[in-house]
Amino acid sequence: MTILVTGGAGYIGSHMAWELLDAGEQVVVLDNLSTGFRWAVPDKATLVVGDFGDEDLVTEMLTRHDIEAIIHFAAKIVVPESVADPLGYYLNNTAKARTLLECAVDAGVKHFIFSSTAAVYGDPEHNPVTEDDRLKPISPYGRSKLMVEWMLEDVARALPLSYVVLRYFNVAGADPQGRTGQSTPNATHLIKVAVQSALGMRPGMEVFGTDYPTPDGSCLRDYIHVTDLARAHLDALRHLRAGGASVTCNCGYEKGFSVLEVIDVVKKISGVDFPVALSHRRPGDPAAIVASNARIRETLGWVPLHDNLDEIIEQALNWERRLHNMKIG
């Protein structure tokens, strides 16, 4: 049996492909390479270049490779972009996911693991936020993901498909073995932007909002190492294979760092005091959001191994240097 990883040539998806192969799984990657990279897909994985919303392609691939489970990463992920282009986000993240789900059901795929987001909570009333707290996304990105969660819940109630929804908090860092990392040239992830600024690849960076109701006025976020996140998906697969019930879990460390704190750590580890401009808030950004992770620990047996902001940033710096020397991304 084989695992299909959609978006497996991208940042988190490529880490997942490596994690699955390290565990002895057979892997097929489906990616249209619009933001992913052919070189990021491990040699032992089968790469199919195409769109996860292409019904004919997906149907043929699921059957030909005897797909047991789908781990679905492929999506648009930039919150401000979703505010400007809501229809594009609903098409890519929601409508195409419905097509993928229908193909999965028709092909008899047993398990579905979905890459959701903390954005489904919007601006939470308290932190850490639990999976049972109110869902009130404040961006089309968050809404597009929540709609897929609802679809999965309804499909699993009616048909023989079990699922795990993983709500990511802020993903950062790189593979500790240096095999892959965040490689998108114009990525908007805070740590990516900060390390590029430290390495002189950007003239500096902006902080969007310093008047939030947080200790230093900048947004507060829960940063999770990408390898711990990939391992959470592997734990989810084991859970479903063992007959575990469908479940939704947060993926975070239950601790928050502000934007200004993260920048200070990047400056400390890199030894570079790069320029930082203070700017206005961006639409769709909540003031603070931190994960409660009791459920994922108890239900999936997840144990984080890289819960250290210094380590996350050091590996992000190392990857950015490596990427620059490879002259890609």
Image: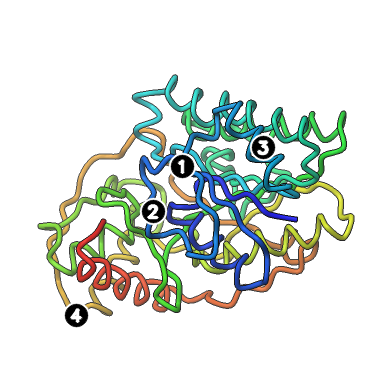
* Of pointers 1 and 3, the one earlier in the residue sequence: 1
The alpha-carbon separation of the residues under discs 1 and 3 comes to 38 Å
Q: Which residue is mark 1?
A: 49
Is there CB contact under 8 Å for labels 2 and 1?
Answer: yes
Question: Which residue is pictured at 52% across the width and 31% down the height?
Answer: 93
Specify few, some or many for label 3: CA neighbours under 10 Å numbering under 14, 14-19, or 20 or more.
some
Q: Is residue 260 left or right of residue 177?
A: left
Q: Which residue is mark 4?
A: 271
Specify few, some or many for label 2: CA neighbours under 10 Å numbering under 14, 14-19, or 20 or more.
some
Q: Is residue 141 left or right of residue 281?
A: right
Question: Which residue is pictured at 48% across the width and 76% down the height?
Answer: 308
Quadrant occupied by the N terminus: bottom right
* Of pointers 3 and 4, the one earlier in the residue sequence: 3
Q: Which residue is mark 3?
A: 134
Q: Amino acid at mark 2?
A: Arg
Q: Amino acid at mark 3?
A: Arg
The alpha-carbon separation of the residues under discs 2 and 4 comes to 33 Å
Q: Nearer the viewer, residue 18 or 263?
A: 18
Question: Which residue is pictured at 49% across the width and 31% down the height?
Answer: 138
The alpha-carbon separation of the residues under discs 1 and 4 comes to 41 Å
